[in-house]
Image (cartoon, grey):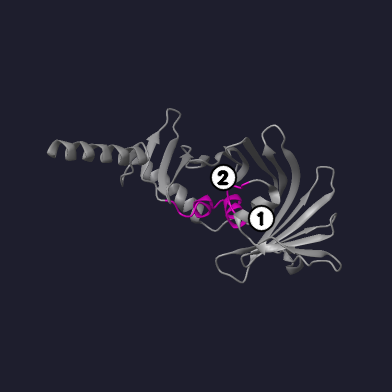
Amino acid sequence: MRALRLCLLCLMLAALWGCAPKGQPLLPQSEAASRWQTFVQRSSAPGRFDVLSGSLRFGPVNDTQRVTYLMRSGIGTSTDERVIRLDVGAPAGTALGSLLFKDGRMTLIVPQERRAYVGEASQRNLRRMLSLPLPFDMQGLNEALAGRLYSALDAPEPERYEMLSGGGIVYRWRKGGTLSELELSPEALPVRWTVSEGWDMAIASDSEGLPSRLSGQMENGEETLRLVLLVKERRPGNDLPPASLRLDIPAGFDVRSID
């Protein structure tokens, strides 16, 4: 009986070890801890909430769609969220839709359909609108593009790390049963973020250390999905007029709930 209990204990420990992130424990005063703190400090500084424009390609890997976007944001009535206005167009310049995210709600206006959709600003509703699971909700994406990835990832606390031959360090943590990894360059810039059974995302930064390209793939059980977001231009957004962060539903449009 004692031998059986010892065998079961060994199996339990092995299972727990298998579920834990691999690598070395992240100890204070280590090079890995110092680099992580540099990343946290940089990512916790006031963000660059500029006016962003660029392109987004998304969809099944062999059938992606490309759109252009213009993103503006400003301080909202909630201290935890920003008001975000996103205008999406076709590469030829045709307006496809406008979205407003405010106080936990979202509004989507599709002029060609003469329809407006309203509902909770959740990843679930964004997925329904885009037919694609995004790596962040819109608030998180806005934070990440502003250089605040630590906040966008919900302030992770790495448990273990692994040194790479090229000088990068991969940090690993588990939260809510999900294993995540973030690779930091020798300059403490994020270069890759992965989530178990989720996105594997490469991150490129511009000369100021701000994200300029997010490129990733994920398996949804049926096919491989791809997403490539490019930031082609940043313009100061400090003096945006209030009207630029409004989105009024035109008269005569059919209004539908997406909740």
Q: Position of residue 63 (x, y in %)?
A: 72, 35
Find numbered disc 2 in the image and state the secondary structure of the residue it sits on. loop
- Give the residue type at disc 2: Gly
Front residue of 218 and 78: 218
Name the residue rendered at 85%, 54% in the picture.
112
Distance CA(mark 1)–CA(mark 2)? 14 Å
Name the residue rendered at 23%, 39% in the picture.
8
Name the residue rendered at 40%, 50% in the picture.
157
Front residue of 41 and 121: 121
Q: In this view, does 213 lie above or below 157?
A: above
Left or right of 32? Residue 240 is right
Direction left: furthest residue: 2
Find numbered disc 1 in the image and state the secondary structure of the residue it sits on. loop
Q: Indicate which disc, 1 or 2, sits on the residue closer to the N terminus.
A: 1
Left or right of 245? Residue 111 is right
Question: Residue at label 1?
Answer: 50
Q: In this rendering, does residue 106 appear at all?
A: no
Direction top: furthest residue: 165
Q: In which quarter of the image is the N terminus?
A: top left
Left or right of 214? Residue 154 is left
The question of residue 154 being in magenta is answered with yes
Q: In this view, does 117 lie above or below 23?
A: below
- Give the residue type at disc 1: Asp
Q: Position of residue 169 (x, y in %)?
A: 43, 37
The question of residue 222 being in magenta is answered with no
Q: What stretch is highlighted in magenta?
A: 133-156
Question: Residue at label 2?
Answer: 209
Write down the quadrant of residue 79 in the picture.
bottom right
Direction bottom: furthest residue: 77
Q: Position of residue 229 (x, y in %)?
A: 66, 43
Left or right of 161? Residue 75 is right
Q: Where is residue 84 in the image (x, y as percent from the top left)?
A: 67, 60
